[in-house]
Each structure stands twice: as C-alpha cells, then as structure tokens.
Amino acid sequence: MQTPTSLTPTLACLRTFQGIPGPEIHALVSAGRVVNIARGERLAQAGDPAGTGWLVVQGRMRLEAGTPRQSLGDVWPGELVGEHGLFGPAQTHVTDIVAASDTILLALDRGTCHATGLRNNGAMAALQRHTLMVTARRLHTLDTSRARLAAPTPQKPDVAPAEPDGQTLMGWLRGLFGGEE
Amino acid sequence: MTTAPLDARRLAQLAARYSLPPDSLVALARVVVQGDRELMVEPGAVLCSQNEPADALYLLVDGALRVRRRDRRNEMKDIATAVAPAVLGHMALVLHQRRTAALVGGTEGARVIALSKAQVEWLLDGHTAEADALRRLMLAAQLDQHQRSVTDILRKLDASTPLPKGWAPVKD
C-alpha cells in the first residue's frame, strides 16, 4: 500500500517538481493523504462541495460535463484536479472528476494547504507556479478564441460577430481543461 | 491618473473576495507596501491598452474598470466591467504576452494598486510568506475567472446548469 512518504521519489521525477529538494517534496506529501482510485470510478461530481484538490501522482484523471456527459480533457501526473477548491474561492466542483485509468492521487485539503508550515515550502510554491501557468494558458486560449471571433477582418468589416455555436462552445470548454502531458 | 496614499484597509476586502485566509493579509500588505504604486484612475482614463506589453499586475481596490477590446468593425467596445475588489492583468503577466484588452476607468473612476512586472516575477519565484500570499491571490483570481467562464459556457450549452450561489452570468 502506498503511503505519502513512498510517493516522494515518484513526485521528484515529475516536471512540476523538477529541481525541488526531496525534503521539501516530502513535507508536501506528508501534509496530504494517498487516494487510490480504479479506472471509471468517480472522484467528485459537479455541484459537490469543493475544499480538496488532488495531485495526480500516477495514472490519469478525466473531467466531464454537459448533458449527456462529455469528456473535457485529461489531467496527467504532476497536475491538480479540483484545484478550484484548493486554491480558488469556489464552493462547489463545476465538473465531474473521473479516473481515466487506475490512478494514485495525493489529496490536499484547503485548510492544510493554508497552514503556516507550507507557506515557505518549495514544493508547494512549485505546485502553485505550475497551476498558475496552466490556468493562465487555458484562460488565454479562451480569450484569444473569443477575440478572434470578434476581431476586425478586412474582408468583412461591417459584419457583426457571429454568436458561437454549440461546436464552438464545446471547443472553448475543452480548451479550458486538460493536462500539459 | 494621479497617485494617492496607500489604503491598506481595502486589502482586507480583496483578500475576503478571493477567500484568502485572514492571516495571509499581513504578508499581502507587505507585498503592496514594497511595490506601492497606488493610482487613481479618472473616469474614461486608460490604465492599459490592448496589445501593449504587460508591465504590471493590477489590484482594483475601489471603483470600477471597463474592459474594452476592438470589435469586428475595428471599434473599441466594452466587453465587461470589473468592480472592486478584483485582481486584473494577471494572465498576460504570467504568460509574458501582450494585453488582450484595454482597461479604462469606470463612471466613478477607480483606485488601483499596480505591482510592477519585476516585483511580481521576483515574488512568483520566492519561498517566503509574501511570495506565497501573492501566488495564492493570483491563483484565486485566475481560478475564479476560469470557473466563471466554464459555468457561463455550460449554461449556454445547457440552460439548466445552475449558477453557483451569488454569481451573475459572465458578459461576453
């Protein structure tokens, strides 16, 4: 059975924690708990209370939303699912979180992450920086897609911007999720 | 634009807006004091322009800013209004991109704390309580914007998707 301590060498190999000393990673994993989840199992549903983020250590998680449920993207080792509950002001999850393969996660609670002991921790800082970068890229993708739809074109200067259709909206939604494999 | 004395009390509202723990406020206040450049943005005055390089992170502590972008007719158009307290300009700064929209003072003007790009980049790499507080603030602002965007798109795809409590739809 995996313990938080046994995850340290695995996490140290991930790009997110590249260059972070082992003891710093160990302090981060010691603040969490290991979750093993089988392929197809649901970790959280849209609307569930948020307050925990899960760092993918091994395997792959999938985000789903819509009626009927559609895949929005996969999240790979070194990245977070449920990051809104961990670092954001969100009260609830906005998508379903499902295991796309047998997966090992490190569960981090919001309260634990706000604890003073992790404020000067290099692994926590690395995780925050990585999440900042990933989220900024996702938002930028959406922003540029929206801007492109409304942008001036020399060929059609007097044509009003089209409303995005369902396919466009789904594309935008998928751009807001998924990992950095 | 003119400068004004720092009003640190408004930081508490900003921290509460993004659900930061109360004890991170002191660290956040230190960040602001270190890089203090508080600006009074008059109604209609341009804080930053579309397509210019991002050189600052903006903490909107009072008033409102209009978010403007060129449309298909090449005219500047309001696409949203940001109301205090809010964090703006983080995306372009993190990605080293140009601004995708302009920020202009709202009808009552705005009070903004500008943190320079150099200060933000230095703090993002740091392992101090101040660095942690700024990263948490920026993360919370980004994730708030992300969740609002997701919810807005889901609602357009499926009108039955409920809005989280207290939220208004994002304006396109």
Image (cartoon, rainbow, N blue to C red):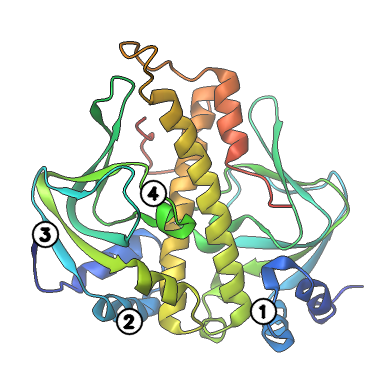
Determine the CA span between mark 1 and mark 3: 41 Å
Do we see residue B159 in this rendering?
no
Q: Helix, strand, or loop for circle 2? A: helix
Q: Residue B134: where, in percent of width, then height?
A: 41, 71
Q: Are marks 4 and 2 on the same chain?
A: yes
Determine the CA span between mark 4 and mark 2: 31 Å
Determine the CA span between mark 1 and mark 4: 35 Å
In this view, B77 is above or below A101:
above
Of badges 1 and 3, nearer the viewer stands 3
Callout 1 amino acid? Leu
Residue at image mark 4: B98
Of badges 4 and 3, nearer the viewer stands 4
Residue at image mark 3: B40
Q: Residue B37: where, in percent of width, then height?
A: 19, 70
- Dot 2: within a 10 Å radius of its alpha carbon, few (fewer than 14), some, or many (20 or more) residues? some
Q: Helix, strand, or loop for circle 1? A: helix
Q: Are marks 1 and 4 on the same chain?
A: no
